[in-house]
Image: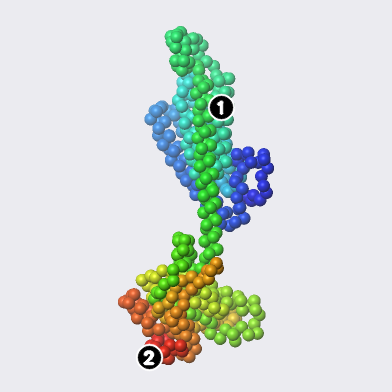
Amino acid sequence: MSEITASPSRLERFAVTQPDAVDLDNKYTEAAMQRHKQEGLELAVRARWIAMALTGVLLIFLNPQWEVLWYHFILLLICANGWLIRRAGRVGQSRTELLLIFVDLLIMTLGMIVPNPFSDDVRPLAMQYRFDNFQYFFIILAAGTLAYSWRTVVAIGSWTALIWTAGWIIAWWVATPIPGISQKVAAALQGYPDVAELLDPNSFDIPQRIQQVIVFVMVAVTLGVSMRRLNRLLMSNAGLERERANLSRYFSPNVVDELSQNDEPLKQVRKADIAVLFIDIVGFTKFAAGRDPYEVIEVLRGFHARMEAEVFRHHGTLDKYLGDGLMATFGTPVATPLDATNALSCARAMVGVIDDWNQERLRSGEHDIHVGIGVHFGSVVLGDIGANRLEFAVIGDAVNVSAKLEAMTRDFNARIVVSDALREQALRENPNGGALMDGFQKRQGQTVRGVETPMDIWVL
């Protein structure tokens, strides 16, 4: 990848192949540019091969003679050069890629103006230009818009105009006209000089040649301006990807989706029934005592990363980290038909992940980790709190009960404690989901601190 940091000089601003000054230090911009370039090159090469194949068939139809193999050879060279361009293509300015593009145009020009060595055609060289082969350059130009920057597209137009003009000027200089035929045509069309010039086999029709290149350059510039607008849109989308990635560091994917798709999606305060999950490390204070702070932080990072991944995998929202634990909600910011089921599945998956992690830790000579998880389903209040710095808050009895259930895992020496309300809701959501409760034991009439009436709970 090329890296552009300094401001371009006045001369560099007019260099048609100079790449756009973009922030390639930004990994999202760099990735977007690279992806756009590779996809564009793949499309351009495929389009070129298809176009050359169709052109080969068309040439057989127009000239069903063995001499057409010369033009098929030219088409094969163009296809092979396209493959080389794809291999050499990269973001930024590539001298090899630019050279191959120039070779592309040179092959096209020579194939059109050099007489066919397999043909015994005695027509003057000037008549080569009557076949209007110049229009095939538009195929190369169109394919270029799929892969190259706007400057390179303009360069293709400029180089084509120069090479083609140089070609017909050289051909005009070295051509050997058929003696006397121009005079005979002029005599036959006396009084109609414009018609005589048009039908003269020795005429290169210079105004027509000039018109071709001017129109081609105008089209190339127009396409270049369009490509520049497309590149700006690409950069804008790369910036949005970066902003979205930054948001995802602090919010779960479903909250990021809600924030990115609506202007004020979370402001309205409302009540809803959701599932709430609390998890923390049992005995973490004792575990951390006397240990190196860096080691403690690494353990917390490993724990949070694994638990966060399970929350997101089960379509939950990471509400907040709580030191050696976290709080997750299922059904926020938008309810789903499987909120209680997802919360219960997440709790069981967390236990499995902790078991796997403990095996790794024990093999490394480290102490194992024990967790307690509490899950409840009930009514909460949802909405933004704060003025300028907003936070999506979930408050209510369901949150408090879930936290108390997590604390009760110590009393029952359990890993998971769920409320009967969550179990019933999970069975309503999925009547065949009884397997999620395998291993749980019911404890009736349990007193939960902060709850007036006893509750039925399930303990794993």
Residue 362 x %, y %: 56, 81
Q: Is residue 105 left or right of residue 435?
A: right
**Does 350 appear above or below 105?**
below
Element under disc 2: strand
Which residue type does callout 2 highlight?
Answer: Gln
Does any portion of residue 181 appear in the rendered image?
A: no
User: In terms of depth relative to the viewer, which is nearer, 315 or 360?
Assistant: 315
Q: What residue is pinned by disc 1?
A: 165
**Residue at the spot 60% in from the left edge and 56% down from the top edge:** 26
Identify whether 78 is placed above or below 418.
above
Q: Nearer the viewer, mark 2 or mark 1?
A: 2
- Residue 59 lies, in percent from the top left, at 42, 31
Residue at image coords 67%, 49%? 6
Around disc 1, counting alpha carbons within 10 Å, would you say few (fewer than 14), some (14 to 19), or many (20 or more)? some
Disc 2 designates what residue? Answer: 444
Q: Residue furthest front?
A: 387
Q: Earlier in the sequence, mark 2 or mark 1?
A: 1
Name the residue furthest left.
431
- Give percent across and percent down for residue 193: 47, 12
Mark 1: which secondary structure? Answer: helix
Return the residue nearer the eye: 357 or 285: 285
Label 2, label 1: how many angstroms apart (C-alpha)? 94 Å
State the mark number for residue 22.
Answer: none
Residue depicted at x 36% and y 71% = 337
Q: Quadrant of the C terminus?
A: bottom left
Q: Amino acid at mark 1?
A: Thr
124 lies above or below 61: above
Rendering coords of residue 100 (x, y %): 57, 39
